[in-house]
Image: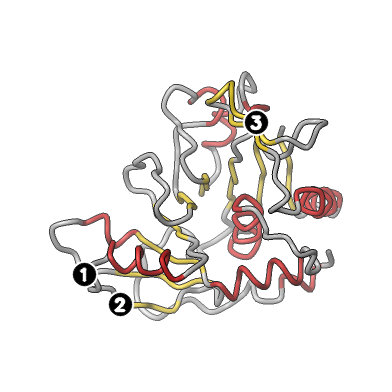
Amino acid sequence: MESEEFGNQNQQPPEGPSTYPLDRVGCRTCAVVGNSKFLRGSGLGLKIDQHDVVLRMNQAPVQGFEADVGKKTTVRVTYPKIDSPQDPGAQLLLLPLNSSGLQWVMDIVQKESIIQKAENPGFRIVQVPRGSNEKKDKVSVISLNFFQYVQQRWLRKHGHFPSLGFITLLYALHTCDQVSLFGFGTDQLMRWSHYWDDKYWFKSNMHSFKEEQQVILKLQCEGKVAVYN
């Protein structure tokens, strides 16, 4: 994948002050932490925490695994209705894929939200006036246009949905200056695992894991991402 895929990186930020953790300020380093069992015993926690921004997916826990996955969480990327660990101060970035997911988001913010255009045109920041629940102003939504862009431009319309980890990687590439990947990939049987669950193995035809890994390898060879497994 050539560098023209990054043509939308240098968008102007929204007017006025912003507390959004990925608004472009200086040279920002980002760690995208996957869920792979390869992280167990890796000792990569300190290296992960040294990044300016740490992104995690779904319910991946931190407590009890700090030595391998770090303590810091800046952004938690997840599908609506999936229970995720509470990360104090972290931004919640949601990917609703259908109308029920969108309705869930609106219920969360109690229809008080103001949709502010984010720095990256693929995303919308959902900002809620502070009230009884201050966490509501830390909810963001990934645009389905960005989801389609990832599927069509990066995976070449292979008929599969991009995984949440791959979406998060592309999000980081479009908003960070330096990106590092931790705990991505499958075993030799193309199965996915969780570092916190010894019994979990996952293999699905829904995602184009092979194509995703080929893209990641190309990005690594081009020096656009650093990969730690």
Neighbourhood count class around disc 2 (C-alpha, 10 Å): few under 14, some 14–19, many 20 upward: some
| Residue pointed to by mark 2 | 114
The nearer-to-camera label among 3 and 2 is: 3
| Residue pointed to by mark 3 | 201
- At label 3, which amino acid type do we have? Trp
What percent of the width, then of the height, locates residue 159? 76, 65
Q: Helix or strand or loop: what does disc 2 sit on? A: strand
**Are circles 2 and 1 on residues that touch, CB within 8 Å?**
yes
Q: Is residue 224 left or right of residue 44?
A: right
Q: Is residue 56 left or right of residue 170?
A: left
What percent of the width, then of the height, locates residue 217? 83, 48
Give above or below for 37 relative to 152. Answer: above
Neighbourhood count class around disc 1 (C-alpha, 10 Å): few under 14, some 14–19, many 20 upward: few
Q: Helix or strand or loop: what does disc 3 sit on? A: strand
Quadrant in which the C terminus appears = top right
Which one is in front, 172 or 19?
172
**Residue 64's image quarter?**
top left
State the mark number for residue 129.
Answer: 1
Q: Is residue 44 left or right of residue 196?
A: right
- At label 2, which amino acid type do we have? Ile
Give above or below for 114 relative to 87. Answer: below
Which one is in front, 121 or 112?
112
Mark found first going from the N terminus, 2 or 1: 2
